[in-house]
Amino acid sequence: MIETVAVLGILVIAAALVAIAVRGRRRQVARERVLRRDGIDADFEPLAGPSRRVSIRRYLWVAALVAVAVGLLLRFVLDWPIGLALAAAVVVALLGWQVDSMWYNRRVFRLETQLADTIDMMVAAVKAGSSLQSSLESAAVSTRKPLKPELEEVIGRIRYGDDPSEVLVELEERLPLETVRLFSNTLAVNWQVGGRLAQTLANVGRTIRDRIELTRRMHTMSAQARFSVMSILAVTYFLAALVWRNDPSRMRGFLLTTVGQGAVIAAVILQGLGIVWIASLSRIKF
């Protein structure tokens, strides 16, 4: 009975995570279709295959691998009941998912901030009389990682004679962000037809900074909900540790019973669903 409940709980959480991943994949496919339909140049065909590498990505598989390792360790090394081992693995997977999400958002925020600074430097260089390629090269010198290697690759390939439109499309594929897409499309269009680059780049930089500011405000507004959930989880495990410390024999006996294991598994499953729900509600969508 306990094993059945545990397996059902794992399947429910896995289904929720798969649904989120499928939804994100559908958005990515839709964006690729829009890019192919409304390309930079009517005579230019985007790359048919995937890009060689993606410089900014999620590492959810690491959290899943660590969770499986923890579950196997608790079950076969420490001889925990299978229900409790699965519950602990779920907790580790959810915590790893949150850590990966925080790290990814931090990296995206840093990259978009560097992109806005790069655009400001390009605007100043263009107003001083520099060409598009010269302004991009001068801006890349003052940029740091993670954006600097990407700009250096773009500049290097253009110097070697590659098509600038193709190089900028590959930049967007390596950095699948809407701000990078706006920046790359702006440069590609100007490279093809010319125009007042300084004013256009200034508007792009202003738009990116507005998005960054809005993202910061949304994170601040949703921080209370996230902290409330984490506080409730921390209090739950603190009370469990306190009860275990005061009367370990009774707590051990409770966890070895069917009712005790069922209660713990149900609590962990509800906590996992709550984390997934709060994460989906606090996700910023433009």
Image: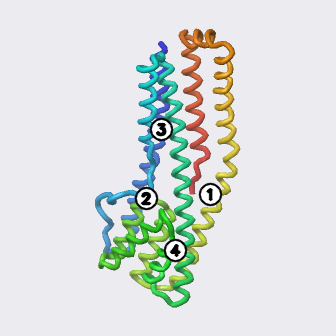
Q: Which residue is mark 3?
A: 17
* Number of marks drawn: 4
Q: For the residue carrying disc 2, how many other residues have a C-alpha within 10 Å: few (<14), some (14-19), or many (20+)? A: some
Q: Which residue is mark 2?
A: 31
Q: Which residue is mark 1?
A: 215
Q: CA distance from mark 3 to mark 1?
A: 23 Å
Rendered image: mark on residue 142? 4
**Rendering colour mode:** rainbow
Q: Nearer the viewer, residue 141 or 220?
A: 141
Name the spot of residue 171 as percent of width and height, x first.
40, 66
Q: Viewer-nearest of labels 2 and 4? A: 4
Name the spot of residue 5 as percent of width and height, x first.
49, 19
Disc on the earlier residue, 3 or 1? 3
Q: In this picture, is 81 found above or below 182?
A: above
Disc on the earlier residue, 2 or 3? 3
Q: Secondary structure at mark 3?
A: helix
Name the spot of residue 275 as percent of width and height, x first.
58, 36
Name the spot of residue 56 as percent of width and height, x first.
45, 56
Q: Viewer-nearest of labels 4 and 1? A: 4
Q: Viewer-nearest of labels 2 and 3? A: 3
Rendered image: mark on residue 236? none
